[in-house]
Amino acid sequence: MGKNTAVFGIYKSSTAAERAVDQILAAGFSNNDISVLLPDSRSSKEFAHEKNTKMPEGTTTGATTGGLIGGTLGLLAGIGSLAIPGVGPLIAAGPIMATLAGVGAGGAVGGLIGALVGMGIPEYEAKRYEGRVKDGGVLLSIHCATSNDISRAKDLLKQTGAEDIASAGEKSASTHGVESEVHSRR
């Protein structure tokens, strides 16, 4: 029962991403299927310290007192802070955190672009996403198991104001996603 395809989008602010996550959860997706990646405007040490001292297991308060991550975003799985060369300090949550930590994104091995390409995103999209995150954008993804989920996820991202929406994953997932990515120019 693997979630083989992820649908990605960029939000202009953590507030916009927070509203999107609320709607995604309301639509029936699990918080374990949602990833966010956003710039950490505070020091990573301060974030990690607060998470360790003020986030006892099972608590549902926000992860930082500064309000950067709170509410719904603070409830996502595996929230943590990491630094990526060329991008800077980031806060990540959900499956993307495991991917970034797993590929050693803290080292110079491909960094964020390498991790995103590893998740199946074409390199040109990965570069665009990295640039948007560097500029303060929030990358949000929903991991989907069926082509119906992929369609619902894309619709939710569109409805909630995401930009640069794309999907990535196993090639056999569905051709449905490919059709909606192709834009004809007349």
Image: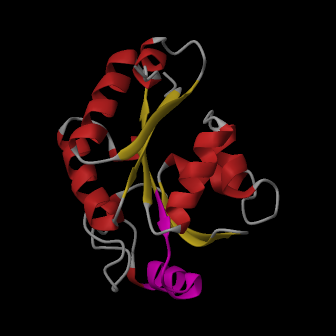
Identify which residue, 46 or 58, lies in the foreground: 46
On the question of residue 79 being in view, the answer is no
Residue 10 shown left or right of residue 124 in the figure: left
Q: Place residue 131 in its image quadrant.
A: bottom right
Does residue 98 sit above or below 3 in this rendering? below
The answer to if 18 sits in the magenta stretch is no
Locate residue 124 relative to residue 79 in the image: left or right. Answer: right
Q: Is residue 101 left or right of residue 140?
A: right
In the image, what residue occupies the spot 19% across and 46% down? 23
Q: What's the colour scheme? A: secondary structure
Locate residue 5, reporting x and y percent: 50, 28
On screen, residue 74 above or below 33: below
> In which image quadrant can residue 136 be found?
bottom left
**Quadrant the C terminus occupies:** top left
The percent coordinates of residue 164 (x first, y second) are: 43, 43
Relative to the observer, which residue lies in front, 84 or 122?
Answer: 122
Question: Residue 114 appears at what percent x and percent y?
Answer: 72, 48
Question: Is any part of residue 108 visible from this angle?
Answer: yes
- Quick check: is 46 in the magenta stretch? yes
| Picture mark count | 0
**Measured along the vertical axis of the image, is residue 9 above or below residue 27?**
below
Closest to the observer: 117 or 49?
A: 117
Would you say 160 lies left or right of 37 here? left
Q: Position of residue 89 (x, y in %)?
A: 59, 74
What segment is highlighted magenta in the picture?
Answer: 37-53
Residue at 37% in and 46% down: 163
Q: Residue at x 57, y 12 (%)?
A: 172
